[in-house]
């Protein structure tokens, strides 16, 4: 998925913003970290790491740690992995 589309979805679905131009969430770790903070406020825990060349991010709820309830995003760039996992957690099919 293109970063512009990811940024737009994050802007609307995670940050709950409609009118302003989306930030570069999928390109910038400082903007992507705001996504992590927003997900924490929504009650999500997270885990992150790097496996060979790709980064991964996993958002999940503490009360439901079944494998099917983990929302993992993988990408060569960590900010994009954060965004993909957040979008999966809120039901966006990315």
Image (cartoon, grey):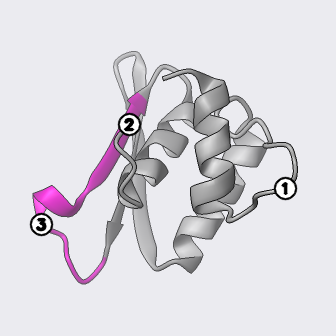
Q: Give the range drawn in magenta.
A: 62-74
| Quarter of the rendering containing residue 70 | bottom left
Determine if the magenta segment contains residue 71.
yes
- Going from the N terminus, do you reach mark 1 or mark 3 first? 1
Left or right, residue 40 beside residue 22: left
Residue linked to disc 1? 19
Who is closer to the viewer here, 88 or 66? Answer: 88
Label 2 SS = loop
The residue furthest bottom is: 63
The residue lying at 35 percent from left, 57 percent from top is 91
Q: Distance between the residues labelled 1 and 3?
A: 37 Å
Discs 2/1, front: 1
The residue lying at 62 percent from left, 68 percent from top is 38
The residue furthest front is: 19
Task: Give the class, few, some or many, for how many residues have Cα within 10 Å of label 2's Cα (few <14, many ≥20).
Answer: few
Q: Distance between the residues labelled 2 and 1?
A: 23 Å
| Quarter of the rendering containing residue 45 | bottom left
Discs 2/3, front: 2
Q: Is 27 rendered above or below residue 66?
A: above
Q: Do the residues labelled 2 and 1 touch (CB within 8 Å)?
A: no
Question: Looking at the picture, how far across and down is residue 26, in whole percent?
Answer: 64, 34
The residue lying at 66 percent from left, 41 percent from top is 8
Circle number at residue 66: 3
Label 3 SS = loop
Q: Are marks 2 and 3 in contact (CB under 8 Å)?
A: no
Label 1 SS = loop
Task: Give the class, few, some or many, for how many residues have Cα within 10 Å of label 1's Cα (few <14, many ≥20).
Answer: few
């Amino acid at each position: 998925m293109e970063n512009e589309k990811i940024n737009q979805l994050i802007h609307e679905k995670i940050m709950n913003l409609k009118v302003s131009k989306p930030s570069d969430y999928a390109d910038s770790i400082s903007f992507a970290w705001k996504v992590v903070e927003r997900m924490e406020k929504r009650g999500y825990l997270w885990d992150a790491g790097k496996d060979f060349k790709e980064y991964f991010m996993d958002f999940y709820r503490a009360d439901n740690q079944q494998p099917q309830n983990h929302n993992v995003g993988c990408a060569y760039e960590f900010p994009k992995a954060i965004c993909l996992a957040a979008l999966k957690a809120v039901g966006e099919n990315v």
